[in-house]
């Protein structure tokens, strides 16, 4: 297995995977202030930079998709929306049979930390 040099920029996906492999290899032994620790820090920066430039994460395009995504990533269920709406109302909202109200938008903004701009985008009802 090739050792990826931390001083080499990541130019392609193969470089990226080699850098990840090296980072995984030294993860548990790298100590701050050692050459291996410095290598770990440099590789982390190189990998992070490459990911920001090359990996695109598709975001939901409407408020309901965003809410569903936020709930799923937090392990939430429809029943967890009880503080803001009854279960049947939550199902109607999440199935786009009923629009979000201002109170719901505020709750999702404050509790799921979703942007007001994203929550107020128009979307079609079913």
Image (spheres, rainbow, N blue to C red):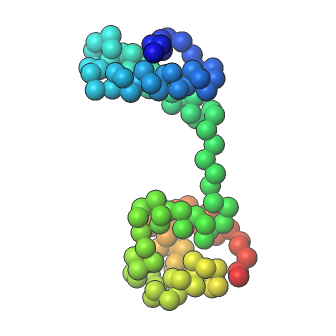
Asked if residue 34 lies left or right of residue 65, the reply is left
Q: Say above or below: 124 vs 85.
A: above
Residue 96, picture quadrant: bottom right
Give the image location of residue 45, x and y in percent: 47, 25
Give the image location of residue 35, x and y in percent: 33, 10
Residue placed furthest toward the front: 1
The residue depicted at 52 percent of the width and 87 percent of the height is 89
Q: Depth check: 83 or 7 in front?
A: 7
Q: Say above or below: 72 vs 50.
A: below
Residue 34, picture quadrant: top left
The residue depicted at 51 percent of the width and 21 percent of the height is 18
Give the image location of residue 29, x and y in percent: 27, 21
Q: Depth check: 19 or 117 in front?
A: 19
One can see residue 53 in this view: yes
How many marks do you count on the picture? 0
The residue depicted at 47 percent of the width and 73 percent of the height is 107
Of the 4 image quadrants, the one containing the N terminus is top left
Q: Depth check: 105 or 7 in front?
A: 7
Asked if residue 65 lies left or right of residue 32, the reply is right
Of the 4 image quadrants, the one containing the C terminus is bottom right
Q: Depth check: 106 or 66 in front?
A: 66
The residue depicted at 36 percent of the width and 23 percent of the height is 25
Q: Say above or below: 106 vs 75.
A: below
Give the image location of residue 60, x and y in percent: 63, 60
One can see residue 6 in this view: no
Q: Say above or below: 1 vs 61.
A: above
């Amino acid at each position: 297995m090739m050792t990826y040099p931390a001083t080499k920029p990541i130019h392609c996906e193969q470089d990226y995977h080699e850098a990840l492999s090296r980072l995984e290899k030294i993860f548990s032994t790298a100590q701050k202030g050692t050459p291996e620790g410095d290598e770990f820090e440099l590789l982390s920066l190189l990998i992070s930079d490459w990911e920001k430039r090359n990996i695109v994460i598709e975001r939901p395009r409407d408020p309901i998709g965003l809410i569903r995504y936020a709930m799923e990533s937090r392990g939430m269920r429809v029943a967890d929306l009880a503080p803001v709406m009854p279960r049947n109302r939550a199902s109607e909202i999440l199935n786009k049979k009923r629009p979000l109200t201002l109170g719901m938008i505020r709750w999702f903004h404050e509790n799921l930390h979703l942007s007001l701009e994203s929550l107020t985008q128009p979307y079609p009802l079913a």
